[in-house]
């Protein structure tokens, strides 16, 4: 049992994927800034990412040092290549299950650390469903981090529970999510396969156990702020009966350019060069296009994006990820003839990894084309930007509905189908041009931007002393302190 007179000590255990590790780095800074002893548990090859991301906090803010402890990742044992310790280093999507298998073997080493350190609480990723039982062995409360919104957590619960897609006659016929506030519409094609097809595959037990662990855990930590989705935060807590604390937007703890520029990976562009390019542009004139750390598009889709962007006449920064398949940026045959020459000075292509938060926060950026990963969406909201929504996989279609149907700060590009292999729908150039123009130019764009700016202000207030997220974080620390 954690003893009463030990200092409050939080263990953070993120899943090994950028979309999960980045917000946990920020969460570590947040806890440390409250004077809480904070330890991140990760694997050896991922440790430098955390030490670099949390480094400036030790020296700049007077917060306490964040400790990083490692446990070996059994890549070879699970049939992965040596050194494959993060999701985006998977050589083929078929190895996804092996990656989860390796992650599933981490229970024993984690238990050893829990026994050794006896932390006050463990915040572990949703994919480590077994962490609830591991922590319970030592009387340690386990909290879950999903990395998504109240809206998505609650919407996916209702869609799974009531199965409204069964009452539609086609994949494209819309249904309204039952017993859920706001008359939210979506289609069967947009519901994840594992929910609608009742298929048993290697990942089915993982999802089932994650759901069970959610109910048995101490509670849920949510990267969101109350003012963004009050109806859904209340619904999640009061109607679905989940104990949850909102402590976001986590990315807002990165205040200076150095912190904003390093987000889990070295950027593929010099940050000063990137800022200089943006400094030469008018306010709200540039659209930022990026699809997160996992989603991939094939060459023909990349070409449609290029042509759509050019036709919109809007200046842009476009991030194209390096991949090992046919969208390998090394081949360059995805660009229309003479594209980069024509776009010189108007468009900047970043091949690889962009300093996203630094870019989104620049005054020249006026809109965001996003795959609707929750970190990206919240970073876009915190920057006050209207968005073109282009969901691909995971819970991204739910996130899209929040932005387009509830907050009304975005327009859908028309992505229709949920993909397990995170490869993306085929969206034609005309749709891309239209959506980009809609969020960047004209009265509708101005209205969306002004609503988004309002939310950005509320986001900043939420994390300041006395704000809703700051207060909820303190309430969590207080409750867990007295729980000991
Ligand atoms: N990101 C970044 N540079 C890139 C691509 C992504 O900094 O070129 C960051 C982005 O700011 C966000 C995270 O990676 O914090 C991606 O998380 P998200 O939930 O948006 O999507 P995922 O990668 O999990 O699909």
Image: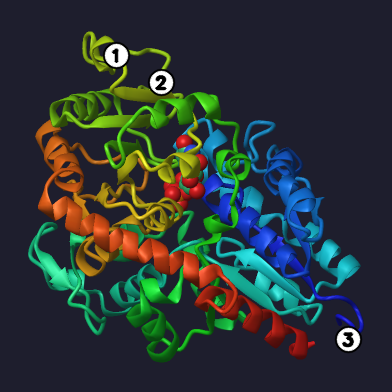
Q: Is residue 359 left or right of residue 177?
A: right
Proximity of marks 2 and 3: CB atoms separated by less than 8 Å: no
Q: Is residue 40 left or right of residue 157?
A: right
Question: What residue would you read off at disc 1?
Answer: 340
Find residue 328 and name its label. Answer: 2
Nearest the camera: 85 or 102?
85
Q: Is residue 49 left or right of residue 457?
A: right
Nearest the camera: 24 or 132?
24
Give me the residue at 27% from left, 37% from top. 285
Crowd rating for badge 1 (residues with CA inside 10 Å; few <14, some 14–19, many 20+): some
Q: Nearer the viewer, mark 1 or mark 3?
A: 1
Question: What residue would you read off at disc 3?
Answer: 4
Q: Earlier in the sequence, mark 2 or mark 3?
A: 3
Crowd rating for badge 2 (residues with CA inside 10 Å; few <14, some 14–19, many 20+): some
Label 1: element kind: helix
Label 3: element kind: loop
């Amino acid at each position: 049992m954690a003893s009463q007179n030990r200092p409050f000590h939080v263990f953070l255990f993120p899943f090994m994927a950028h979309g999960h590790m980045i917000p946990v780095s920020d969460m570590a800074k947040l806890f440390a800034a409250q004077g809480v002893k904070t330890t991140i548990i990760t694997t050896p090859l991922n440790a430098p990412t955390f030490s670099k991301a949390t480094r400036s906090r030790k020296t700049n803010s007077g917060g306490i040092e964040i400790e990083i402890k490692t446990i070996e990742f059994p890549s070879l044992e699970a049939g992965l290549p040596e050194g494959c310790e993060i999701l985006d280093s998977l050589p083929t999507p078929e190895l996804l299950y092996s990656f989860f298998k390796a992650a599933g073997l981490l229970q024993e080493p984690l238990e050893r650390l829990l026994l050794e350190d006896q932390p006050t609480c463990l915040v572990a990723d949703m994919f480590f469903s077994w962490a609830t039982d591991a922590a319970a062995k030592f009387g340690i409360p386990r909290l879950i981090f999903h990395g998504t919104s109240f809206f998505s957590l609650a919407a996916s619960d209702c869609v799974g529970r009531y199965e409204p897609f069964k009452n539609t006659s086609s994949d494209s016929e819309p249904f309204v999510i039952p017993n859920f506030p706001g008359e939210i519409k979506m289609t069967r094609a947009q519901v994840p396969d594992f929910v609608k097809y009742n298929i048993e595959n290697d990942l089915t037990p993982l999802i089932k156990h994650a759901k069970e662990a959610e109910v048995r855990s101490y509670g849920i930590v949510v990267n969101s702020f109350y003012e963004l989705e009050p109806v859904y935060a209340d619904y999640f807590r009061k109607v679905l009966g989940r104990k949850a604390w909102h402590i976001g937007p986590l990315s807002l703890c990165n205040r200076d350019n150095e912190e904003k520029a390093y987000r889990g990976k070295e950027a593929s562009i010099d940050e000063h060069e990137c800022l200089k390019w943006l400094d030469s542009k008018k306010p709200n004139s540039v659209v930022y296009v990026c699809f997160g750390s996992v989603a991939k598009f094939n060459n023909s889709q990349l070409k449609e994006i290029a042509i759509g962007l050019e036709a919109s006449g809007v200046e842009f920064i476009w991030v194209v990820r390096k991949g090992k398949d046919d969208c390998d940026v090394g081949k360059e045959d995805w660009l229309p003839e003479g594209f980069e020459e024509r776009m010189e000075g108007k468009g900047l292509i970043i091949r690889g990894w962009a300093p996203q938060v630094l870019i989104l926060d620049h005054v020249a950026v006026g809109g965001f084309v996003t795959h609707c990963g929750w970190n990206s969406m919240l970073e876009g909201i915190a920057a006050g930007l209207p968005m073109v929504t282009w969901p691909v996989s995971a819970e991204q279609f739910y996130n899209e509905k929040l932005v387009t149907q509830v907050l009304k700060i975005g327009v859908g590009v028309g992505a229709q189908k949920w993909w397990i292999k995170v490869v993306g729908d085929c969206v034609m150039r005309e749709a891309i041009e239209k959506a980009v123009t809609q969020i960047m130019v004209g009265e509708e764009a101005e209205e969306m931007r002004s609503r988004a700016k309002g939310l950005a202000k509320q986001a900043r207030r939420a994390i300041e002393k006395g704000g809703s997220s700051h207060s909820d974080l303190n309430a969590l620390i207080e409750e867990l302190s007295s729980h000991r």
